[in-house]
Image (tube, rainbow, N blue to C red):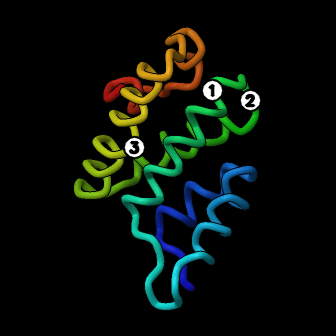
């Protein structure tokens, strides 16, 4: 199955998520891969877990890549990432009780503006 742009860019930053996501993709029938909404939901769940476990290396790589993608994205992709990844991740972190001090070091100017 061909990978979407979001998969290619974001999943590669999180080795522990890449394995999990590949298994999830294989569970779908050929020709009907999971959509970007499913990817972003699974990705948010994984990042919340990384933050809760204080997994610095992967979290750093993820937020660095996200900041870069936001800077290079066209307006439609930027809106999707801001709404469905950054803002939703912020809300999920609050719900999970993740202390903002644990997140702040990872936020670049673009993610911080949306967070």
Q: Locate residue 113 relative to residue 41 in the image: left or right.
A: left
Structural distance between the alpha carbons of marks 3 and 2: 19 Å
Mark 3 or 1, nearer chain start: 1
Element marked by disc 1: helix
* Residue drawn at 31 percent across, 50 percent down: 78
Q: Position of residue 48 (x, y in %)?
A: 56, 32
Q: Quadrant of the C terminus?
A: top left
Callout 2–callout 1 Cβ contact below 8 Å: yes
Structural distance between the alpha carbons of marks 2 and 1: 6 Å
Residue highlighted by disc 3: 85
Q: Nearer the viewer, residue 69 or 102?
A: 102
Element marked by disc 3: helix
Residue highlighted by disc 1: 51
Q: Position of residue 82 (x, y in %)?
A: 32, 41
Structural distance between the alpha carbons of marks 3 and 1: 15 Å
Q: How many C-alpha atoms fall within 10 Å of the one at disc 3: few (<14), some, or many (≥20)? A: many
Q: Position of residue 6 (x, y in %)?
A: 47, 62
Q: Which image quadrant is residue 112 in?
A: top left
Residue highlighted by disc 2: 55
Q: Is residue 15 above or below residue 99?
A: below
Q: Is residue 12 above or below residue 104?
A: below
Mark 3 or 2, nearer chain start: 2
Q: Locate residue 111 relative to residue 98 in the image: left or right.
A: left
Q: Quadrant of the N terminus?
A: bottom right
Element marked by disc 2: loop
Q: Position of residue 4 (x, y in %)?
A: 47, 72
Q: How many C-alpha atoms fall within 10 Å of the one at disc 2: few (<14), some, or many (≥20)? A: few
Q: Nearer the viewer, residue 73 or 58?
A: 58
Q: Locate residue 99 relative to residue 18 in the image: left or right.
A: left
């Amino acid at each position: 199955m061909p990978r979407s742009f979001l998969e290619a860019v974001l999943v590669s930053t999180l080795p522990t998520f890449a394995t999990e996501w590949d298994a999830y993709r294989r569970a779908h029938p050929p020709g009907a891969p999971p959509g970007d909404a499913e990817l972003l939901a699974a990705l948010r769940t994984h990042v919340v877990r990384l933050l809760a476990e204080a997994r610095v290396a992967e979290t750093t790589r993820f937020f660095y890549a996200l900041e870069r993608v936001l800077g290079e994205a066209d307006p439609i992709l930027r809106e999707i990432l801001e709404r469905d990844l950054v803002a939703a991740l912020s809300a999920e972190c609050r719900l999970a009780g993740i202390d903002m001090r644990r997140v702040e070091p990872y936020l670049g100017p673009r993610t911080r503006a949306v967070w």
